[in-house]
Image: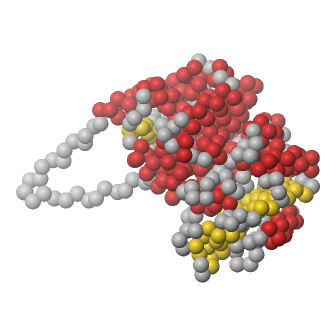
Amino acid sequence: MSLRALALALCVSACGAAPEAKPAPPPTLAAAPRPKPAPAPQINPEEEALTRAIQLMLQRVAAARKLPAKRAVAARVLDREAVIERIIEKSERDLPKGVLEAQGELLRALELVPRDYDFVAGIYELIEKNVAGLYDPDGAVMILLDDLSLPLVEQTLAHELVHALQDQHFDLDALIKYSAGDTDRVTAAHALAEGDATSAMLDITMGSAFRIDVNQMRMLLVASVAMSESGAETPRVLQGALVAPYVDGFAFVQAIRARDDWGGVDRAWKRLPKSTEQLLHIDKYEADEPAVHVPDPPFPDEGFRKDDADVLGEQGLRLTLEQWTIRDRAAAAAAGWGGDRYLVARKPTPDGTESAVAWHIRFDSAKEAAEAATEIRRALPKDCVERATLGPIAWQRRGDGIAITAGPYLRNRASELTSRSTCKAARAWTTRVLDTR
């Protein structure tokens, strides 16, 4: 799914800001009557040479992307451990406490990741094993990994320096900043950033981005992630979420470029897609089709509080359905998306913490809701199943709406999971979710 937490973490890895520099300590006087002059600062020859190479590549990127560079971009070379520490620090500063954990609870309850999967650690490991570089807009610095091969250096520079131009012209960091309840829009903006950078990179490295189509792009990226060091251990839904911004953004940008080249892409930055539905359907973007407002689902019972609530969007629905059916069917079923809202709720108890998840999806018509229900039924053939650890999972379609609920279930102090509900209660909760309009 757009996987809000993962998408935001990926925004950091692609173009995130660096931690603020700490002020230097005040100088101290030497004991001798005449202190020695301070040594000249050490210049890293590797980074100095890389900075010169970056300026040359920046000129190429600016010419290919048809956006003039407004300022120079310096260079840093870091190892993977240092880069992931930078990304984690940025994420912890920018995301409210508990957002990543709540996202993991959503996926766990819907059985999109294994019950014992450490979602937060898994996200950062996935990024660490796949990131090649990042652009830091705060310091106007291009950061490269110290273990890249020369061909990958060129591709990474071409891609990330487009992010530098985006930031110089469109204030990229502000456009992808976390905003509670507004993540589907942020996800669409992130995809535009990645699609723009990918298209320009291919113009530079292949002569033209139009020499590769979207399906080829998706297959290459999926294979690259799957064969990475952590790929085999990463749930498919997270692999899909890592690839989606690049593939969907590339398709969007290519559709615009086919009509109006880079001028049209510049205008898209000034009128961003408002949802991943608009991102995935250029005609809906041009018509500025709004999403259907769906309120927060109700709690399963008293004592619960909202841990997280947001929109997964059409992209999120498609990525979920891809776990339950083939990709083409998932995309066709998700195309009827009109709006949605999920809820992750928790309740403290003397034995631990109870968790519950609800997801309410509205479609453009009852017919399109029925088409999506056909795909959901492949994974959930019964309207409710009682699970010993994660509680009941229930779903229901009524008219143009589908509701899925999971739990409540208890995580005790030993992190053991135990159901705290029944299908009778789950069906009643699912009906109340559909009643909320």
| Residue 14 lies in quadrant | top right
Q: Is 254 or 316 nearer to us in this picture?
A: 316
**Side (left or right) of 73 relative to 293:** left
Q: Which residue lies furthest to the bottom in this view?
A: 350
Residue 98: which quarter of the image? bottom right
- Which residue is found at the position 72% from the left and 43% from the top? 322
Q: Residue at x 32, y 32 (%)?
A: 46
Q: Quadrant of residue 214?
A: top right
Asked if residue 280 can be seen in this view, the reply is: no
* Residue 99 in picture, x, y percent from top left: 60, 61
Q: In this view, does 154 lie above or below 129?
A: above
Q: Is residue 24 left or right of residue 205?
A: left
70 and 259: which one is in front? Answer: 259
Q: In this view, does 348 lie above or below 131?
A: below
Q: Where is residue 358 in the image (x, y as percent from the top left)?
A: 75, 62
Percent across and percent down for residue 419 are: 69, 70
Look at 80% across and 48% down and name the residue there.
Answer: 378
Residue at far left of view: 33
Question: Above or below — where is 40 with respect to 113?
Answer: above
Quadrant assignment for the C terminus: bottom right
Residue 163, position as x, y percentages in the image: 55, 37
Q: In this view, does 193 lie to the left or right of 257?
A: left
Q: Which residue is drawn at 47% across and 29% down?
A: 152
Number of marks drawn: 0
User: Going by the image, does 70 lie left or right of 50?
Assistant: right
- In the picture shown, does residue 437 fall above or below 55? below
